[in-house]
Image: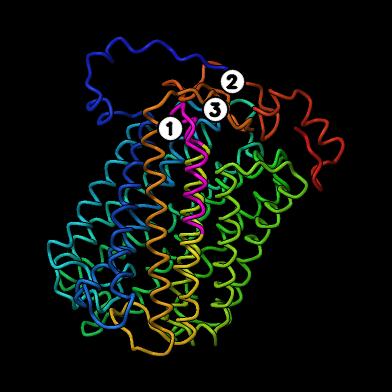
């Protein structure tokens, strides 16, 4: 049902090697693919670090790692997974899909888009190169004065690498905002944009306001370490708490930078596989904008135990930000309620995301209670919380999106049997790995320490957590094999294998260079559905069927 025919190859394409073509490309689809493959490679690197740590922690005592190496691994694991995996992966998905969903030919600034990508591998080289210069054993939060008093030159490389990644994010945010506001197709009003576009827009605003704050802090920290600046050094009149304010003013919006695109991905998948429109589209848009606004009011809930912040204010707003998140959960459940659910792999991952992210969200509500936060501060309860949010949140949504849009990106559909094997390994492994950490944290086991006391039950729970980590690692193998075998096979998925709703499915798979020769009329947030079912959206609106489960397919 494509409205686009693939144009003839450019006359000079045959004279350029494919390597040069990819190195110099400004096509948003190729840049998106570069982001995705680079981020997946970093996912494997960060996963190997996690396995090394969990192997050490399977039993009390020192078996495989020295304390210094363990400190470097837990620090670099977090930096790798957050800055080199989730953020570039979400940017890659957005790069490939968002211009297609709004009917644009490319991103607004193609060369800046390419520059934004190439800053990522440059930053990765600096960050991972820290291992060769004494490492950066200071945690992903890089708290002063520890960062100032640790002499390893690897910390300087980490700071420079993060500045490059921050510059990439700022350039990408500007590009997404310009693309979304200026390059939408005729009829694509703001209230007709797909939810992935909305979440990308709000994410870009968050990055534009939060990332310069972190970048400034990184520069100040670099000056402190190398030129005696004294911003955060108490011996020079500085204030270590200032670093925490600077870092967490970025760090909490950063949580939503990682999660909002995941919300958008799930919100694209659930309606398609429920055979219903997204329940409460306008409420969902408002909830997304509310999360973006409230994200800047709760940074200091990470600082309850410092004694330097007003606890009731940040506790209240931490509870308040759960409200728009809850709206999204009810919208997803209402969309599925009464729908003709088709549990293909994308929906499995979407439902897994909803179930597990709910656990991480409830953990966050517990941590908003100040006395409870004092009790579990810096214990494994916090480790469990962040991993339920980011693994169950970002990783499950990423795999949902990759399975969903893989036919659009390549023309081939991933194997469903391998996809479901992978899902269950990852789902079980995630719970086995991270749920025992709740119990360890409540019993007082502190995080960021290479060894622990042989207290009753701790060894068993840690061993269980390590088994879960290896199950997560095992779940990656079917995915790699799935991608490898699928790309070697025929590209016969068709242009719209899921019977989907949004504009990217109105062009060929994979799309041509300039995406569309012509566009269908855009009368709602589901233009491809409208094209396939003329008048259905109008009939649906007239009947008021959006309230509770009427099928419009």
First to last magenta residue range:
405-427
Most common secondary structure along the magenta stretch? helix
Secondary structure type for disc 1: loop
Residue highlighted by disc 2: 519
Whichever of labels 1 and 3 marks the residue nearer the N terminus, that label is: 3
Secondary structure type for disc 3: loop
Frontmost residue, 43 versus 60: 60
Q: Which of the two marks, 1 or 3, is nearer to us in this view?
A: 3
- What residue is drawn where x is 54% and y is 24%? 495
Q: Which of the two marks, 1 or 2, is nearer to us in this view?
A: 2
The quarter in which the N terminus is drawn is top right
In this rendering, would 545 be left or right of 312? right
- What residue is drawn where x is 60% and y is 66%? 321
Whichever of labels 1 and 2 marks the residue nearer the N terminus, that label is: 1
Frontmost residue, 451 versus 35: 451
* Residue 157 spot, x, y in % from top left: 19, 60
- What residue is drawn where x is 37% and y is 57%? 473
Whichever of labels 2 and 3 marks the residue nearer the N terminus, that label is: 3
Inspect the magenta stretch and tell me whether residue 192 lies in it.
no
Residue highlighted by disc 1: 108
Q: How many marks?
A: 3
| Residue 361: numbered disc | none
Inspect the magenta stretch and tell me whether residue 419 lies in it.
yes
Residue highlighted by disc 3: 103
């Amino acid at each position: 049902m494509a409205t686009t025919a693939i144009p003839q190859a450019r006359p000079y394409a045959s004279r350029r090697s494919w390597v040069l073509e990819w190195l110099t490309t400004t096509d948003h689809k190729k840049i998106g693919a570069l982001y995705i493959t680079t981020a997946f490679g970093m996912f494997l690197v960060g996963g190997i670090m996690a396995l090394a740590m969990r192997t050490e922690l399977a039993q009390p005592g020192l078996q495989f790692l020295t304390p210094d190496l363990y400190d470097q691994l837990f620090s670099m694991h977090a930096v790798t997974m957050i800055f080199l995996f989730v953020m570039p992966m979400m940017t890659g998905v957005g790069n490939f899909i968002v211009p297609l969903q709004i009917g644009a030919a490319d991103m607004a600034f193609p060369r800046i888009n390419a520059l934004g990508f190439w800053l990522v591998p440059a930053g990765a080289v600096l960050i991972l190169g820290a291992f060769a210069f004494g490492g950066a054993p200071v945690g992903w939060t890089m708290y002063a004065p520890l960062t100032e008093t640790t002499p390893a030159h690897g910390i300087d490389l980490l700071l420079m690498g993060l500045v490059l990644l921050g510059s990439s994010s700022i350039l990408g945010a500007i590009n997404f905002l310009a693309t979304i506001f200026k390059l939408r197709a005729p009829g694509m009003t703001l209230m007709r944009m797909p939810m992935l576009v909305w979440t990308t827009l709000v994410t870009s605003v968050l990055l534009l306001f939060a990332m310069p704050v972190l970048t400034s802090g990184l520069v100040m920290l670099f000056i402190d370490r190398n030129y005696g600046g004294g911003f955060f050094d108490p011996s020079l009149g500085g204030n270590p708490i200032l670093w925490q304010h600077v870092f967490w003013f970025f760090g909490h919006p950063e949580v939503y930078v990682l999660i909002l695109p995941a919300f958008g991905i799930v919100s694209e998948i659930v309606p398609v596989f429920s055979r219903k429109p997204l329940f409460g589209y306008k409420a969902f848009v408002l909830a997304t904008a509310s999360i973006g606004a409230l994200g800047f009011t709760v940074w200091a809930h990470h600082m309850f135990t410092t004694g330097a912040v007003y606890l009731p204010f940040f506790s209240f707003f931490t509870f308040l930000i759960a409200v728009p998140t809850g709206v999204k959960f009810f919208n997803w459940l209402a969309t599925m309620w009464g729908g003709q659910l088709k549990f293909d792999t994308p929906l499995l991952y979407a439902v897994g995301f909803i179930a597990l992210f709910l656990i991480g969200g409830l953990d966050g509500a517990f941590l908003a209670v100040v006395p409870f936060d004092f009790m579990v501060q810096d214990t494994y309860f916090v480790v469990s919380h962040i991993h339920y949010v980011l693994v169950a949140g970002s990783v499950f949504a990423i795999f949902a999106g990759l399975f969903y849009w893989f036919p659009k990106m390549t023309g081939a559909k991933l194997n469903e049997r391998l996809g479901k094997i992978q899902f269950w390994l990852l789902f079980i492994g995630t719970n086995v790995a991270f749920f025992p950490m709740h119990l360890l944290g409540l019993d007082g086991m502190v995080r960021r320490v290479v060894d622990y006391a042989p207290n009753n039950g701790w060894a068993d729970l840690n061993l269980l957590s390590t088994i879960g980590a290896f199950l997560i690692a095992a779940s990656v193998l079917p995915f790699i094999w799935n991608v490898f075998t699928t790309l070697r096979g025929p590209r016969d998925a068709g242009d719209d294998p899921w019977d989907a709703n949004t504009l990217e499915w109105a062009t060929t798979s994979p799309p041509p260079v300039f995406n569309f020769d012509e566009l269908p009329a855009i009368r709602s947030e589901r233009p491809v559905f409208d094209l396939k079912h003329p008048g259905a959206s109008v009939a649906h609106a007239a009947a008021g069927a959006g309230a509770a489960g009427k099928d419009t397919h």
